[in-house]
Amino acid sequence: MKNTGPQFSFPNGAPIYQNGAKQNECTFIILGATGDLAKRKLLPAMYDLIAHDRLEKFVIIGAAIEHTTIEHILDGAREFVVGAIDEKVWQHIKERSYYQPVNFNEPKDFTRLYELVDSLEIKHTLKGNRLAYLATASSYFCNLTQQLVASKIIKKSIATDDLWHRIVYEKPFGYDAQSAHEINACIKSCIDESQAYRIDHYLTKELVSNIALIRFTNIIFEPLWNNRYIDNVQIILSETVGVENRGAYYDAYGALRDVVQNHMLEVMALIGMEAPEKLTGEFIRDARAKTLQRIQVIDAVMGQYEGYLNEKSVRPQSTTETFAALFLRINNPRWAGVPFYLKTGKALDKKETVIHIKFKQVDCLLTKNCPTDSNYLTIRLAPDESFILTLNAKKPGLSQEIVPVSMEYSHSCIVGQVNLSAYEILLEEIMRGEQSVSVRFDEIESAWRIIDTIKEEKIPVQLYAQGSKGPEVAEQFAKKHGMRWRS
Ligand code: BG6
């Protein structure tokens, strides 16, 4: 583990995740319980919550169209729990987990689901805080919200601190601005805004929630955070995996809708936003929303990995992009003229999510040899959560040669391997009623407008080899704009 930089420390004995009291109770209702998200993320996150002793009482009720059993679903989720499983905890979860087949279009099935929820809350002496997680495609969101409310599983306006009913909507929320609008109008007619959580798991990643803090609590950054001192910003989300067994979903959505519309643009909004009045939920959402409204697309190139067309459930002639490189700007006085470059892809050479903020190069007045490079602030979200400040310094010895040196804060070196998944934090924050983990509709809408603009261009995809750095056009794009991808 690298730890070459200054030593940071937290108060002795402070727990890694200090965010208030343990939650008392929750009835989790997972719609789409047989899907990938439930298996890979939600159920393991629920296990973690219980294993970390963050939730006292609970019941988990899975529902989906398939006729299956909760044992089968839990068996599938087991391998996605990170680290050794505590069998006692697993058994405890098994004893409080249930499954019921539900046809999403059948009101009678929701009445039966309501009866199950009600009887299980009595059985397990729960007072009825309900979190309905829609782990489904967004085309079901409207219908499912209506069914949940009509069957009284979720009651409108039950949103006090003492008793709450909440619905969680996975990303991507919609397919484009128009569909997102329609879904949102439908949801608004069923439940209060305070009951709706349109989530983006990136917002609970440790270093993403740290971006605003790094900016606004360090005098060495915020005064420089503008077009006078920043040359460009790169946001890179690179993955080694292909579409895995999500071919049908991915082929309909592609990289722009899958990760750019949500994760990458939200990160860009956090980097670009003006200082919020306070560093809390609604103020941060306001600041992010204003930034997203000002984003303009300058250029874009697309790619598709070789062999993508052979993936299960992908259309034979599909032109869906599995790679995208974008040049965006934020049209406001702070960022006038500063390029924001975004790059993402599946089946690339490495798994990495990183932000590089490149500062302008200084004039060489003092030394014989000019600095070799600009200063960079690198915020690494994964792997090895860290931030790194690259400075210029004299090479040890007699020469006056300048070399780049890195000061690195490695999160895991200080707090130990961070063992809280983004989804675990997400569930806990939703139970707590923390709205900043939920993306407000105006943010979603602005982000869709950006994606819609790019999609209208019908940019052809260029093939790239699996395990490579992406298509050749990404390098041509870099040359054309006089930049260099930093990873
Ligand atoms: C999900 C996308 O939202 O984010 C996936 O649907 C992608 O395609 C994933 O792999 C990346 O998330 P993370 O947390 O692994 O960076």
Image (spheres, helix red, strand yellow):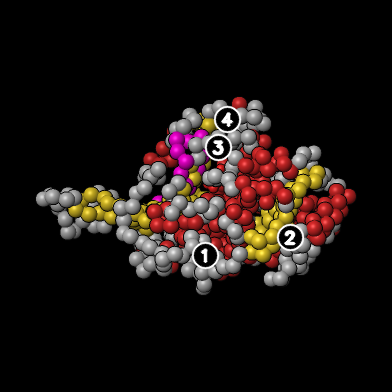
How packed is label 4: few (under 14 Cα within 10 Å), some, or many (20 or more)? many
Query: Which of the two marks, 2 or 3, is nearer to us in this view?
Result: 2
Q: Position of residue 130 (x, y in %)?
A: 73, 60
Dot 4 or dot 3: first in sequence order is 4
Residue 485 higher or lower than 442, as above or below: above
Relative to 15, 457 lies left or right? right
Name the residue that disc number 3 marks. 322
Q: CA distance from mark 3 to mark 1?
A: 38 Å
Q: CA distance from mark 2 to mark 3?
A: 37 Å
Name the residue that disc number 4 marks. 308
Name the residue that disc number 2 marks. 130
Residue at (64, 29) in percent of width and height: 312
Amino acid type, mark 1: Gln
Q: CA distance from mark 4 to mark 2?
A: 40 Å
Secondary element under disc 2, as helix, strand or loop, is strand
Amino acid type, mark 3: Thr
| Magenta residues, start to end | 342-356
